Amino acid sequence: MTALLSASAISKSFAGVPALREVSLDIRPNEVVGLIGENGAGKSTLMRILAGTHQPDSGTLLLDGQPVKLRSARDGAGHGIGMVFQEQSLLLNLSVAENIYLGQEDRFIRFGLMNWRAMRAAARRQLAKVGVDIDVAARTSELTFAARQMVELAKALTLEEAVSRPLVILLDEPTSVLGGSDIEMLFSRVRSLKSRASFVFVSHRLEEVLHVSDRVYTMKDGQVVAEHQARDVSAPQLHQIMVGRGLQAAYYKEDKQVPPRSEIVVDASRLGVEGVFRGVDLQIRAGEIVGIAGVVGSGREEVTRTIGGFLTHTSGTLRIKGEAVHFRSPEQAVRKQIGYIPRERRVEGLVMFLSIAENISLADLSSVMRGGAINYGLERRLAGEWIKRLHIKAPSPDIACRKLSGGNQQKVVLARWMTAGSRILVLDHPTRGLDVGAKEEVYELVRELSSQGVAILLISDTLEETIGLSHRVLVMRDGAVTAHFDAAPGHKPDQVELVRAMV
């Protein structure tokens, strides 16, 4: 069977650092191809070459067996290749219909005027393909993330109207911030669309890849190292291939979980934010990791943002190292040695166009100031030390953070707060979007910080991670704490116990 789209011996380097090394793969008609690998394995670079946004240094792309050069994303779209990005490419200030036909508006212009009725009718037809009923006149910012993901998919399917060949749709981490029911809805749409398109599905969640894919390619260090039929391989086997070691109980480094110290550094009593959460009692000792579990809307995110200075509490008291505080900004929290690791590291955590060195020193410029000016040599040396210590994969401290993989970006955020001398860390989904190998490195860092006496407040994507990392777990529901669990090594609570208190 001739592949719709093939990569043959594709290689690509950036600033002399190889990202892809003679990568070959096939995307056949009416199939879902899974693509997995650790952060930095080359998945995103390969996807962008397939879409036309990057061009290979060597190797060939083949469409229906014939060589083709894709010079831009528009060029790729003209050949029926669309991409749904992890960060989403929608413009939130435009309507759903405008986003679906962004760049294709001339189709609806008659005598110099836009035919909005025709555009909206066409947008409704596209949304019908993915089986969702959304008001096409609504501003996209009003939609949930899951609904926006469906709009992205509908937007990609508009290519059917411009090309005569089957589509290839590239899905880059489409489930990274979706819940269970939303993920299953997306998978249902992908399966139903296989009769009219082929898909490449990139995800760090191995079970999801096996659930939705027909074949799976595994990448490591810029190369394809394995290809499997999804039915013939398991998640632990894929993990072994990706990182060279098995997925074991020691994944969360429980053997390195040491008892916390006696000093209470965070003490919240009856803490509340009007209309959001209420009556929260929370203590964190030096060296202790306290996890908060709960469903979306339980109030757990807002508790962490209150400790981090993003929300101001309206009731109760908050004491940091015995001193009553009333934060009105994150800057005030930083002055109390509180660091915040946000879930959206690309938006809140880093200045993406700045270098590693500049991002690391950003929270405490005094550490690199000499004579009233920034000492750039000192800044670079400091960053170099963190690159070595945290094993950040980067050719130099001068490279922009936007060029790093997600796992390496997260390490830069951690390095920043360690440079600033933070003794309290708020970890808001610290491993979101990271592969299993990068997660394990983050867990190692968290354990190291805990052993050094850093107090840590954690919320996570999974109950397993929350339980595995924490000394204690609080459960929240409807803005209130409903249960407390000790989580000593070897005596971790069962997920079912937590779920009972969550729902």
Image (cartoon, rainbow, N blue to C red):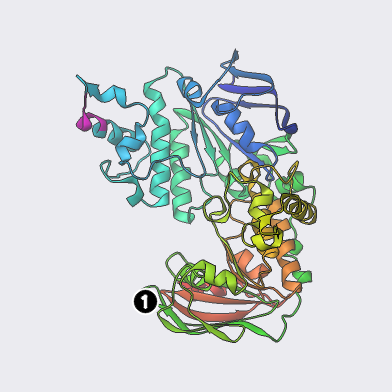
Residue drawn at point x = 55 percent, y = 77 percent:
474
Q: Against 99, is 298 above or below?
A: below
Q: Residue furthest front?
A: 371
Residue 174 belongs to the span the image colors magenta: no
- Can you tell which quarter of the image residue 62 is in? top right
Q: Position of residue 310 (x, y in %)?
A: 47, 67
Q: Position of residue 59 (x, y in %)?
A: 69, 20
Please state which of residues 214 and 79 is positioned toward the viewer in this rendering. 79
- Quarter holding the C terminus is bottom left
Highlighted range, magenta: 113-119
Q: Against 315, is 468 above or below?
A: above
Q: Does residue 278 appear anywhere in the picture?
A: no
Q: Against 488, is 131 above or below?
A: above
**Amino acid residing under circle 1:** Glu
Q: Judge from the rendering whether residue 247 lies leftward or rightward of residue 430; answer left or right.
A: right
Q: Judge from the rendering whether residue 254 lies leftward or rightward of residue 212; answer left or right.
A: right
> Which element carries disc 1, helix, strand or loop?
loop
- Quarter holding the N terminus is top right
Give the labeled residue for mark 1: 274
Residue drawn at point x = 77 percent, y = 51 percent:
384
